[in-house]
Image (spheres, rainbow, N blue to C red):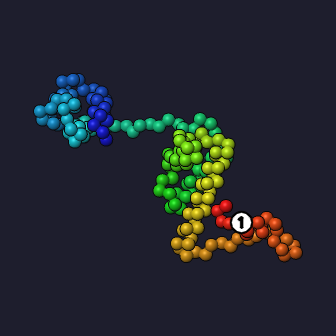
Amino acid sequence: MTRSNAIQLIHIAKGQLALDDDTYRSLLGAVVPGKSSCREMTIIELQNVIQAMEAKGFKSKPLRRSKRRMSAPSDVSLKIRAIWRMMFKEGFIRDGSDIALDRFVQRQTRIRNGGAGVSSLEWLRGDAEANFLESLKQWHIRAMREAMLAHRVRLPEIRLPVTKAGTMTQSAALTLTQPEGG
């Protein structure tokens, strides 16, 4: 907590406890002898004042966040959220919250846009949303492969399509000839 935040909180407590100016200043003087103004106090002294006000019945309320979603989420954004939460449950990411996802979206879109990123998943549209989904899926696949290899679990074999004659289809042959990652 910064010094200015502590002072703001003390003034909120003063109002909530309905303290007149004389009572308020005597409380400050009782908690921090010789000082009757928040401006004169250090951060530790301000925190002591807050604790004294809490003992008198002050209850601080956490900031309320406004509802974020203005419109119904798209199918793609629902898939993105599902993969994000799955990666959290599997231990590949530390924070599975929507706020963490929005921060990740902003970092990734900033890189792609070469500057300012899109600050929320809800604002991604069209190709940007589809590209983000694909990159998240690829990251998830890489993380799963690494985890499987670390636990010495055998990776699943790739089954390529074969014609009735027993030969590989043209698309399967192309898949085998393309270098990995390209």
Quarter of the rendering containing residue 83: bottom right
Q: How many marks?
A: 1
**Amino acid at dot 1:** Gln
Determine if residue 19 is in view. Answer: yes
Give above or below for 165 relative to 45.
below
Residue that sits furthest to the left in the current view: 34
What residue did someone put label 1 on?
178
Residue that sits furthest to the top in the current view: 21
Q: Quadrant of the N terminus?
A: top left
Question: At which x and y percent is residue 78?
Answer: 63, 48
Which residue shows up at 55% across the image and 76% down it?
A: 152
Residue that sits furthest to the right in the current view: 165
Which residue shows up at 27% across the image and 26% down it?
A: 18
Which residue shows up at 17% across the image and 37% down it?
A: 31
Mark 1 burial class by Cα count in 10 Å: few <14, some 14-19, many 20+: few
Query: Helix or strand or loop: what does disc 1 sit on?
Result: loop
Foreground of the two, 103 or 71: 103
Question: At which x and y percent is residue 150?
Answer: 52, 72
Question: At which x and y percent is residue 168?
Answer: 81, 71
Which residue shows up at 64% across the image and 45% down it?
A: 128
Foreground of the two, 48 or 19: 48
Give above or below for 152 relative to 26.
below
Quarter of the rendering containing residue 146: bottom right
Determine if residue 119 is in view. Answer: no
